[in-house]
Amino acid sequence: MKISHQLFQQHFQVPKDWPSLPTYKLFEEAGLVTFLQAGFPTFLPVGQRLVNGVNSVIREEAVRAGFEEVYLPLVQDGAFLEKTGRADQFGEEFFRIFNSRLILTPTNEEAFIHLSSHASISYRQLPIRLFQIADKFRNIKKPKGVLRSKEFLMCDMVSIDMDERMLRESAATFERVVEAVFRRLEMHVVRVDKDDGRYVDFLVECQEGNVKIARDPDRYQQGGTPASSVAMYFLFGHHGPEFHGGENSPIASHIGTYGFGIQRCIHAVIEQHRDNLGIAFPKSLRPFDSSIVLFDPANVKQRELAERCYGYLLASGAKPLFDDRPDKMLKEKAGLADFFGIPFKLIVGDREADSGMVTLKWRNGKQEWISPDSDTLARILA
């Protein structure tokens, strides 16, 4: 990414007084997201890289565990929720379309059930495990940042199981997905279950959370420290579509629904990975893995060397941030790279342009003098 070609360049700076900013405010001040309308986030390029990173981690772990990806419409019939008796839970949060029965999707459990009811399912196929990553819409009265927005991104997952035993196996499979995802995102998560494990929340402590949890010697319980739910599952039981069980008459399957809040995961990562320089993103989620700090973009020799480094990094599959702004000092450019958690910077000034070498400075302060050839850069990235 070349900063000189980006929208909202005023956000490409270390936010003033950022250590004291609540995380939901930091999203906007750091240029990750903007709200042109209350409750409807617009993710800007750096923020979208974080979204793509979380999506990729979840998608990879879900597929590895045997879930297959689908895509459900953003519009559904309100009757889906009425059939399961859950329409009242949303009250006035539905976004209705022209006063019809159609609504913008607030949740997808019933949509998955409706989809599967149109298939002819044999017991030999079970379990069937599906997922999707898509937007949801709820007309929340008091939206707040990306934690509680009216439009939000979710990973929805479902399992169609033969019986209670298989349903519990699917839940255990999802828990392994949760463990793998949060290990890669380097997040500390608290597991809270209710109703004999039929409803499970995975919570992170955060200042803006709307769930209260408290510690006791053995476990976490609701009521106390602020927290936010980043993943959950709910085991419906025998309310799923019928399947054919050999010579027996059709049998109702068991349904489990599971999910991750994408925006909440990003919020939690930022909350948990702040340090004295900015946000030390985990490797799996870094929006950039390298930075080129060009001292004087108007200097032809400097720019040629910096452009050559940028080309090498892109060709190697890296995600470089190229700070080629003409109106910023070297200290500001280096500080921005540190704030975004970029592990190393390639600094190009007069000395570097004259010698053909570049200064490599690590985020931890270590510094060395290197040849900016593709083999050297590939070794550093590794």
Image (spheres, rainbow, N blue to C red):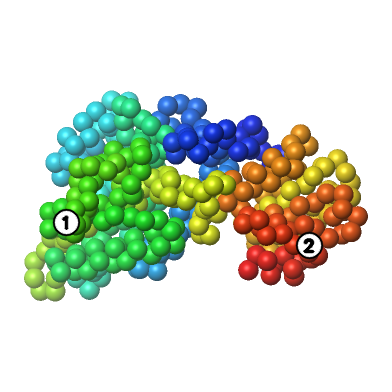
From the top left corner, tell me how far across and down residue 238 is, in percent: 12, 58
Determine which residue is flagged by label 2.
369
Which of discs 2 and 1 lies nearer the camera? The answer is: 2
Amino acid type of disc 2?
Trp
154 relative position to 50: left or right: left
Q: Residue at coordinates 35% horizontally, 68% vertically from top-left?
A: 65
Most foreground residue, 350 or 124? 350
Which quadrant holds residue 142?
top left
Amino acid type of disc 1?
Arg
Quadrant containing the C terminus is bottom right
From the top left corner, tell me how far across and down residue 108 is, in percent: 29, 47
The label on residue 198 is 1
Disc 2, SS = strand
Q: Residue at coordinates 44% horizontally, 62% vertically from top-left?
A: 184
366 relative position to 327: left or right: left
Most foreground residue, 381 or 234? 381
